[in-house]
Amino acid sequence: MKTAFLLALIASSAAAFSTQTQQKSSTALSAQFFDDELGAQPPLGYWDPLNFSENGDPEKFARYRYVELKHGRIAMLAFLGEIVTRAGIHLPGTIDKSGTTFESIPNGWAALSEVPKLGVIQLFVFVGFLETVVMMDRTGEGEFPGDFRNGFIDYGWDNFDAEEQLSKRSIEISNGRAAMIGSVLILAADQLKIELPLIGQM
């Protein structure tokens, strides 16, 4: 028993001095560039499973961060919209001249076929307006990707110290990621006809 232990000990110490080529994965290469960036949070740290940022290009990273923030904000609105309408709260009035009420539009995927064509066009025009006129850094004053204040509205942002600003930006990224996952789960459950309990019923 002691002989076996000594042999194992010798073998392990010899292995420590052997020359072995260690190759880093692409994800590890990505992480070495951006593991201190905002959004690299426990337990995953910097998570880039498809290796989009493996070359460490800061401009590409800023672009991806901008897109992530935008998708996260859209997903937060989508998730909130799902929660509100599934709770039975709808806009008053009608959505078209034929008298289709907002309340009569079903939730989830079924809404796509029930919203009148002119309503869909109005949605696309409104979203296009937001995308090209409102939701962008028009003045060049943005301090970070997704900063659309344009010197106009800051909701007290400048009153926060640097640590609190960083914390709030981190919270937004986390909430956006959670909302993206939550929105997909709601739509998947809707497609699979799984009944989702309302918050008050949980």
Image (cartoon, rainbow, N blue to C red):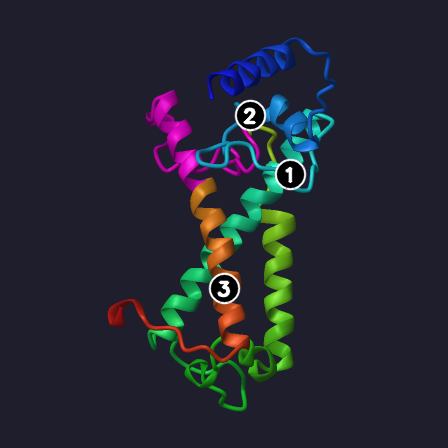
Residue 174 picture quarter: top left
Q: Nearer the viewer, residue 15 or 22?
A: 15
Classify mark 1: residues with Cα within 10 Å, few (<14), some (14-19) or many (20+): some
Are discs 1 and 3 less than 8 Å apart at CB? no
| Residue plotted at (39% across, 73% down) | 196
Please tell me how crowded label 2 is: few (under 14), some (14-19), or many (20+) other residues with Cα within 10 Å. Answer: some
Foreground disc of the pair 1, 3: 3
Q: CA distance from mark 1 to mark 3?
A: 23 Å
Q: Is residue 179 above or below residue 171?
A: below
Q: Earlier in the sequence, mark 3 or mark 2?
A: 2
| Rendering coords of residue 154 (x, y %) | 41, 35
Residue drawn 62% across the image and 56% down it? 129
Chain part drawn in magenta: 143-172
Point out the residue furthest to the bottom here.
Answer: 98
Residue at disc 2, secondary structure: loop
Judge by depth and name the residue closer to the eye, 130 or 171. Answer: 171
Residue 110, percent from left and from top: 55, 81
Q: Residue at x 62, y 43 (%)?
A: 67
Circle 3 sits on which residue? 185
Instruction: Name the side, left or right, on which 174 lies relative to 74.
Output: left
Task: Label 1, secondary structure: give it.
Answer: helix
Q: Residue at x 58, y 16 (%)?
A: 12
Q: How many numbered markers are drawn?
A: 3
Q: Nearer the viewer, mark 2 or mark 1?
A: 2
- Tell me if residue 104 is in the magenta stretch: no
In the rendered structure, find residue 35 and report the number of the disc placed on it: 2
Mark 1 lies on residue: 64
Check residue 8 in the rendering and tell me which mark sits there, or answer none.
Answer: none
Amino acid type shown at disc 1: Tyr
